[in-house]
Amino acid sequence: MTSDQDRLFSKPLAQVADFRFDEKVASVFPDMISRSIPGYGQILHTLGELAQRFARPDTRIYDLGCSLGAATSAMRRALGERSLEIVAVDNSEAMVKRAQEHLEAYRSPIPVELVCADIRDIEIANASMVVLNFTLQFLAPEDRDALIRNVCAGLNPGGVLVVSEKLVFDQPSIHALLDELHLDFKRANGYSELEISQKRNALENVMRPDTLAQHQARFSEAGFHASGLWFQCFNFASMVAIK
Ligand code: GEK
């Protein structure tokens, strides 16, 4: 599967439009996400390990905001021959079209139902694991509680929700430090100052991260009995919540 290098914000733009998950983004997505999110590869690997621990026979795993299906693929590989189904959902047609090609390229006995839909509208049922890998931050803040409640209701007892997100921090000095360290990570991965600042403007109205405390309160209000942080690098984190 070919994927181009992310040069989307490399030229000065007269006006920076709000970021959209369109064909241009889908075509460079693997390069963009691995150069932008510290620990992305580690998180995918661990999603596979968590799937091995939590997936139960004859249940479903949901990958919400699946993009090109990287998390689904990692879990499918890790699960080998287990008898269950993965439901992968994204509302970007460009992403779903490419995800289909990626998933077809890998032979696995685990069926994937790939759905082009809004994750706010789907029914979650008989789930042993639900993954929101860097998706919740793109949902309108007022819709996040309902989504997490819906996920908790659709998980079987003992099931796990994995939520990976960019975080914000209440203490300004910590927020600024972790943000700078992340920008250094992007610089080290070849992004220019222009690319960094234009991308930041494009994401401003579209991606609104929460604090860790907001996530934890949301998990417990939704009905999860335990939650914790299993990964953090700079201002990027991944959490687990267990029903
Ligand atoms: C990965 N999980 O590689 N309904 C459905 N999809 C949505 C919605 C929504 N309401 N809002 C946003 N999306 C992936 C990476 S990317 C993260 C996830 C990033 C989708 C959107 O179309 C995009 O594909 C994905 O959520 C977020 O493990 O680009 O930073």
Image (cartoon, grey):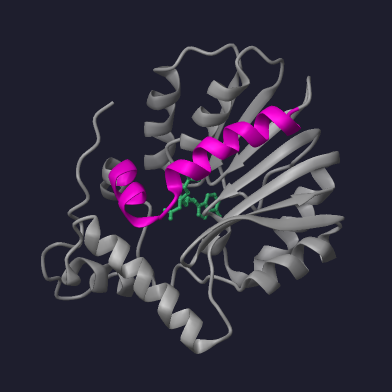
Give the camera-side residue of 23 and 185: 185
Q: Position of residue 236 (x, y in %)?
A: 49, 61
Residue 41: say if magenta: yes
Q: Position of residue 147 (x, y in %)?
A: 70, 57
Residue 18 visible within the image: no
Q: Relative to residue 76, is residue 120 depicted above or below? A: below
Magenta stretch mostly in which secondary structure? helix
Give the camera-side residue of 29 and 176: 176
Q: Residue at x 69, y 72 (%)?
A: 214
Q: Residue at x 54, y 32 (%)?
A: 72
Residue range (magenta): 29-55
Q: Quadrant of the N terminus?
A: top left
The tally of labels here is 0
Q: Residue at x 58, y 84 (%)?
A: 170
Q: Position of residue 57 (x, y in %)?
A: 78, 20
Task: Classify residue 93 by image quadrant.
Answer: top left
Q: Relative to residue 219, is residue 97 depicted above or below? A: above
Q: Residue at x 52, y 36 (%)?
A: 45
Give the camera-side residue of 178 and 7: 178
Q: Is residue 183 left or right of residue 213?
A: left
Q: Relative to residue 203, is residue 41 depicted above or below? A: above
User: In the image as oriented, which residue stretches furthest toward the bottom?
Assistant: 172
Residue 191 visible within the image: yes
Q: Position of residue 90 (x, y in %)?
A: 51, 43
Task: Classify residue 229 by image quadrant.
Answer: bottom right
